Each structure stands twice: as structure tokens, then as C-alpha cells.
Image (spheres, helix red, strand yellow):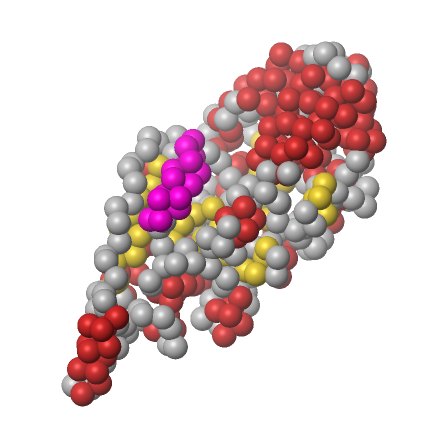
Amino acid sequence: MHPATSPTAGVPAGRNHRTPPTRRRFVRGLAAVALAAPLALGAAACGGDDAGDDGPVKLSVFWWGGDARAKLTEDALALYTKKHPEVTFEKTWQANQGYFDKLATLTAGGNPPDLFQIDDNYLAEYAGRSTTLDLTSYKDSGKLDVSKFPKSLWQYGVVDGKLAGVAAGENTQGLVYNRTLLEKNGLPEPTTGMTWEQHIAWAEQVAKKTKVPGTQDPSADYKAFWVWLRQQGKDLYKGTELGFTADDVTTWFELWKGARDRGATPTPDVIHEGNATDITKQLVVTGKAATSWVWANQMPDLKKNTKDELGVVAYPGDPSAQWARASMYWSVFKGSRHKDVAIDVINFLTNDPEAVALLGTDRGLPSNLDLRARVSETATDPAMKQSIQVESDLAQKFGESPQVPIKGHSKVRSELTKAAENAQYGRATPAQAAEQFLAACKSAIG
């Protein structure tokens, strides 16, 4: 997922006030006598909450993203209203920065949006607060159709046995490399399945031949650490605890110290630059490293910022350690007055051919595999076609999805960066940095 760059666009206003129970019973009785038809919302209106009791429905929707995502999302929601005129939307979006602060404020103030975007950094936290609606019964009834999703993709929205969010799109880790640089110097391209040691040896060879460090040092990158852990039979989390030890972190940090000592990576200052910058300035496009460790769907954004041709493969090691990750989710507020409508909107955004075609790959590859194939056929951006092809190929090798990260995950991520940079700059040995990281992690997850 790539961070948005547009400014905050405000806060969703309050939703319609709840109709008093007495009046609602009266309205129901009157409607029954008059044989009035209920609000027509397809599957969403069946056996639901109060979708048809209050007449027209105004659903509040909140998401992060830039101008392009806003336009695509607004077009898709307008299409829903065209097909369901009784439903309109109160739409609010803002940049990634500050989004979750705003969502927390809305939730604490008792005025969260009916439908909101969330990612795996916070899904478990919001599910644990009983903020998100359990979507399991909707999935089981077919009102929320995930039958065309990869199994591991929809399962990556389950928290404590409850389906807390539905994947708005799929993504996976991608090792992006500068193909032009390699071809110009007669060097081989990296391949899916090469070991970590083979990758570092390849990066050292690239650095010696081109004078460009072969790879960004990913020791601060939780994505790379997570994949590596899974290849060791471990995981980032195990239940409510960490799934790794200080010894595991030490081994990880020592692996990359060896790579730095061999000149396979940039210097610490440049590594820090790669750790701190956004996707448009990753080292693979600024020419400061031949590879960067990103999400596969970020290929088009990278390509916009370089004239060189780029390639992408899986992270080193066994590719079955990677999984069909939800790039982000749609979740429904548990206290929403319009739960069934919100569910139907999610179903529409992920399974309606027109809506999926409109949204394209902005939130990752379409979750619905049949519609993903259609989008792939019509995609005109070579970088996006390449990204779709790579992820489709990797899908055959994916393993089971891990559990959704636990509360405190965002802090764990930032502490990994801090500890890794301590090791990179020589402020601590790998073992010392690992101990510091483990202590900080235990404090973060409480």
C-alpha cells in the first residue's frame, strides 16, 4: 500500500439521528397496512437491520488516499447510488498521515463512520475494542461473497475467530530491481527462489561491477524480517505474544552486517534515507541501490519516477513464506444503523464488474480472482501489467496467511527501524540491538 499525499479533507459529519422506537413501530405498522415495499437493496435488504425502516439511507464512508483514489472511489460509490437511488454517501478522505488519529478521535467521540478503510497495522486493535462488526454471518450467508477470493486473502481479515475486515485488494512483498542497470553491465537478474546468501552475493557482484550498491539493507524492514522469520519456521506473532526471540533478531541483524561489510549495501546514511522516504524516492529509483524492498503493487509508482526499466521478483528464500496479503480492508462500524447496506456496498466494491473495473488496482490487485483477470486483460500500464503478472505467478506458491498483527504492531515496526539503525550505524552490536528491540516490543504489545 502506498501512502497518500493529499491534504486532510475534513471529518465525516454526524449521521441521521435515530428514529424514536415508538415512531418506528408506528411507521412499520402503517407500512404493513399500506403494503409498502421495503427499500430495494438486493442482498443487503434481506433479513437485515433497519435498512428499509428509515427510508433513504445516507452512509458515511471514510478512507485515506490521494486525489486519484478519491476520484476512483467517488465514481464507484456514485455507480452504487445509480443502481440503488435510495442510498447516498457522506464521503470523507484524507492523506495517510493522521488518518488513524482522526479515526480514533471519531471512534472515541461516538461518531465513527459506517464504513471505513483500515489496514493490518490496526485491524486487530479496532476488532479488540469491538469497534468493527463481525462479518462472519454475512460471509456464511453469501451476502458478503468471498467465494472468488483466495482463501488466505479473506482469512487474513479474521481476528479472534471473527471476520473484522474484507480485503479491498491483494498485495504481497516484492523485490524491485533496476533491469536497465543490470543489462547495461551484463549482469544476471535476481530470481524468485534464490537464497538470502545468494541474494547478498549477487548484490555484492552488482556493487563491484556498477559501483551502485546491489541492494538496500532491509534489516529495518518488517516485511523482509517477517518473511525471513516464516522461512525459519517462526512468525512475527504467535497468539498475543511475539513469535520470535532475541537470538532470531540477532541472526537477522548479523546477516545484514555481513552484507554491509562486503559492500553489497549502501552506507548507513543512505540506508536511513531509504528507510525514511516515501515510495517515490526509494533507492532503486534514485539510483542509490539496484534493488528496493516494497509491496508488489507499488511498481507503477516506482516506474513513474525513473526512466529505467524495472523488474520485480519475490523476496529471497522459499516464496511459500509470502502470502496473499490484504493491501487494506473495508470494515463496518459495529454500531452502524445501516449494517446491511454497508455490507452490500463492500460486496459491490469487491464483486461488481463495473465497480471493480472503475477501481482498478489502486488498492492492490482485485480480491475477486475472476475480475482480477479481467482487469489484467484491460490494463494498459506496462508496470501494472507486470505487477499483476508477478503476483499472479506468486499466488501459485503462496503459503497460508499468518494471523493479523496484534495491538502494538505499529510500534513494533518503528522499534525495528530504531534497533536496526543502531546496528547499521555501529551504535550497538547486532546482539545488543536485538535485545533492545525485544524489550521495546514486549512493552509495545503490553
The reply, left or right, for residue 111 in relation to residue 175 is left
For the record, the magenta segment spans 96-111
x, y (%) of residue 157?
56, 55
Q: Is residue 412 above or below residue 264?
A: below
Q: Is residue 62 above or below residue 100?
A: below
The reply, left or right, for residue 375 in relation to residue 313 is left
Residue at point 69% right, 22% down? 420
| Magenta-colored stretch includes residue 144 | no
The reply, left or right, for residue 265 in relation to residue 258 is left
Q: Quadrant of residue 220?
A: top right
Toward the viewer: 290 or 258? 258
Residue at point 27% right, 66% down? 84
| Magenta-colored stretch includes residue 110 | yes
Residue 330 in view here: yes
Residue at point 38% right, 40% down? 105
Tally the marks: 0
Q: Quadrant of residue 76?
A: bottom left
Residue 287 in view here: no
Most prominent secondary structure in the magenta stretch? helix
Location of the C terminus by quadrant is top right
Toward the viewer: 214 or 351? 351
x, y (%) of residue 344?
38, 65
Q: Is residue 43 above or below residue 433?
A: below
x, y (%) of residue 185?
69, 20
